[in-house]
Image (tube, grey):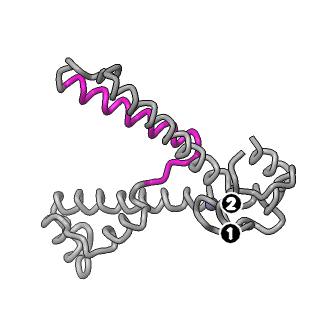
Amino acid sequence: MADKQKPIGVCDHCEGPIPRGEWYTSKGTARLHCSFECKQTANSRKGNSTRVSKLVKRVAVGLWKNPRDGLDSETIKQLQSVTSRKGRLREVAEGRWRNPALTDEARKKLSRPRKHSDVLHSAIEKLRTMKMSELTIEERDAYHAYRSELRNARRDEINRLARERYHHRQSESSPKEHEKQREK
Ligand SMILES: [Zn+2]
């Protein structure tokens, strides 16, 4: 059992506050983490240093062999895409996946003035004063694609908020049940 690093009531992982009334576990020891996510992440990082030191030892004694040695670059590319897809699916299954467009970094980038394609740009400019029917087909297509992109981004945002509300409700409505999940 790991020792508490931060003061009682402070998450060892994110250093955020642990909700009052959850500062101690049912066993009476100080709770380490504010949430299931923080607990999981911290535990996985801890395990990771063990895995890495084992790997370093195997490399040092010459036991480690790159499993991709001797594969051609096309096969390696395929393996990489399979691996990253698997990782993403696992994140989705565990509810950890976040739309990369919603990170602070990405938001900043997206909120900068957009460099639209020339066609889209002229479509947007024209629509200030003209009707859709007065645009060229290319302009209309570009504009519709642009609008649907915006809709998708909004839908992702709405889904994210719904997920957060759901988790919040879960923790409000049944602290007992939530507690049980945490102990796992
Ligand atoms: Zn935390």
To which residue does mark 2 refer? 34
Q: Pick whichever, 19 or 43, lies toward us.
A: 43
Q: What residue is drawn where x is 55% and y is 45%?
A: 46
Q: Is residue 9 above or below residue 64?
A: below
Query: Is residue 170 shown left or right of residue 49?
Result: right
Mark 2 lies within 8 Å of ligand 1 (Cβ measured): yes
- Amino acid type indicated by mark 1: Pro
Q: What residue is drawn where x is 60% and y is 66%?
A: 15
- Secondary structure type for disc 1: loop
Query: Is residue 150 shown left or right of residue 133?
Result: right
Where on the image, by quarter, is ligand 1?
Answer: bottom right
| Furthest residue in direction bottom, as rendered | 129
Q: What residue is drawn where x is 83% and y is 48%?
A: 177
Query: Can the viewer see residue 166?
Result: no
To which residue does mark 1 refer? 17
Query: Is residue 65 shown left or right of residue 103?
Result: left
Residue 162 is situated, as x and y percent measured from the top left of the image, at: 62, 59
What segment is highlighted magenta in the picture?
74-99
